Image (cartoon, helix red, strand yellow):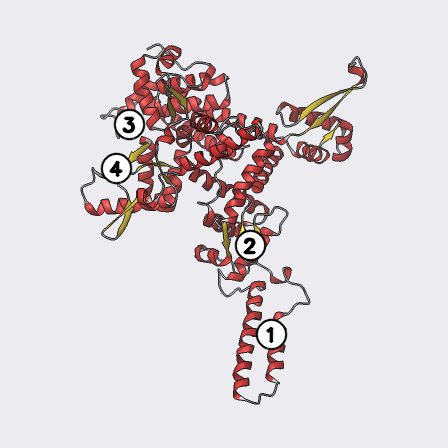
Amino acid sequence: MNAVVPDSAKTQSAKSYLYTTLAKTHLGEVAAIIVSTLISNGRLTAKDLSHRSEVPLKLVKSTLVSLIQLGCISYWKEDSSKQVFYSFNENGLLIFLHSGDIINHIKLTYGDESAEIIQNIIEVGHMKIEDYLQNIEDPDIVFNKENLLLKLFSDGWLRRVQLSNFQPIDDLWNQLYQETLKNTPRSTTVSEIKRVNEAKDKTKLKFTNLLESGNSAKELYQIENGIKKLSPNLVIAFNLSRFEKHRRTEQLTNLAKARIGILTSKVYECALQLIEQNSPDLRHSFLKISGLINDPVEERLFVNSIENLLVDDKKIVFNVKDLVKITPKELDLRNSILTHNFLKPTFNPKKRVNDEIQDLNSKKIKTEDSTSNLILELDSGVLEVNIDFDMHNTDNSEPHSVSLINHHLKLLSSGVIPFLIEITPGTYTVPYTDLMKHVKQFNYDTLIKTTLGLDAFRILRCLKSLKLADEKTLSNSSLLKDKTVRNELFKLMNLNMIEIQEVPRSADRAASKTFYLFRHKEFSAYNFLHNSLTFCMADILQNIQQFKNDNKILLEKCEREDVKGNEEELLLESELKTLKNLQVREINNIGKFNRIKTLYEIFDNC
């Protein structure tokens, strides 16, 4: 086979370069060629794939089976021609991209055995529970594995695999839409636009029902001897959406840590973890369908409607008492809040309670009935005031008191950036959509400040507030010299952080009479940064692969059974030195890759 990964895989787009490099690193050369061909040409049949990629048809078919198993390829069978078309699916390769972080998080949260289960599932793509447990003979180990699988599935880390998961979402939507449109009759009283919108609404409902079907308790679980476990016939795979929610929690926690403080960020992290599983998805199915939602305003309204629906259903709502239950024991919040900063100077609830008690005690009591009634009234009155007192005063006797945690939540909800929204007293929700804008903006500003310097950061801040400005206006507003402003604008333009607009003063557009205005557009700037980070990640993976290929003979020698464990005795001193340099170089590159990936995740959905 003479086929190689084409140069277009690198030059076509940053995502194409990253996905092709990932496929080559994890799955081999042939898989990378097929992925690159499908990204370049869209959906193709197996014969077309073989023709365009110059890979033998038999090898193409066997590779497609593996890629479908791993969730890297989707397939669609046309009803009319009976042909099977294959298209690229990024979910499988995104799981490979995050696999190290996924396994590490599961290991820290659930333990080594759960991490082993997740690793096994990621390696094969998806599996039936019965097949996974059939090779284990010890019934105690089987029972333990079943409990771990149930826990991971209940917490959302595993999902059920159905036929729709292997089909392209665009083709699936188009089929349902055409059927619905065909069954929606034309009418002289109803316009065609209204008919199409009505068909879209019906299709959305059908599409949602299709994706959510098969998730009833009867189909997922079975009870044996009073013990609940997953059905043996259930096919499961790793849920990427659940991990993306976890990463969003980390990003919001880091923002709270930078803006408010470490202790408050720990409380905020607990609050986010409490509602993390039910929080809105980062990649909603409707937003993946091309042509369904094109208008940015419509997209924003759709995302907000999903979040509002979750709030109405109380799925992303929590109260202070829920938070107290899950706060880590090692987190000590005593003396973390100064009460007088939150109370009015004239308000003294303790004095008010004592005065009320004295007034009630000074009253004359004539009968036993009136005495008992008065005592009841006194108890209820004091109780009500004490509850109010507890909510507004800091109790430093306990490390996780309700009042302490409530004050930290007040800090989070009353700042310039509203990390929480208080729906009712003591009940909060998280405005995810608005907060992610602040996360991107904060990280983008920090990146500019650390890489380009304070002058560039100041000019960009001024440009954001002015919306549209020329050099002179920027110089006056930023209090910098004209030369400095020009130099910094040149740097910002080279990195596509600002846009330039030519404004001619004459009809012939003479250069001598033309001046320029500058503006900053967040979407364009974030998108360029995301593409740059994507390309850098692919380049690092390519470099790791390249220096491994350059020392292929030495690495193959180290893999031999007689050499393993005896490298110092059997290898030359120069070979040992080269091997050590290779190891150090790979570790440094992986560290750089992970740092870039952290930023990449923040701007991935810009």
Mark 4 to mark 2: distance in Å?
A: 44 Å
Tell which residue pokes out farthest to the left in this image.
137
Quarter that holds the C terminus: top right
Tell which residue pokes out farthest to the bottom in this image.
366
Disc 1 marks a residue whose amino acid type is Val
Q: Give the vertical position of 523 relative to 318 (above or below).
A: above
The answer to whether the residue labelled 3 contacts the one labelled 4, judged by CB atoms less than 8 Å apart, is no
Dot 2 lies on which element?
A: helix
Can residue 317 be seen here? The reply is yes
Disc 3 marks a residue whose amino acid type is Glu
Left or right: residue 452 compared with residue 22: right
The answer to whether the residue labelled 1 contacts the one labelled 2, judged by CB atoms less than 8 Å apart, is no
Disc 4 marks a residue whose amino acid type is Tyr
Residue at label 3?
567
Q: Earlier in the sequence, mark 1 or mark 4?
A: 4
Dot 3 lies on which element?
A: helix
Quarter that holds the N terminus: top left
Nearer to us in this view, 215 or 62:
215
Q: Earlier in the sequence, mark 4 or mark 2?
A: 4
Q: Earlier in the sequence, mark 3 or mark 1?
A: 1
Q: Residues within 10 Å of mark 4 (few under 14, many from 20)?
A: some
Residue at label 4?
132
Q: Could you say which disc has been placed on residue 353 in the image?
A: 1
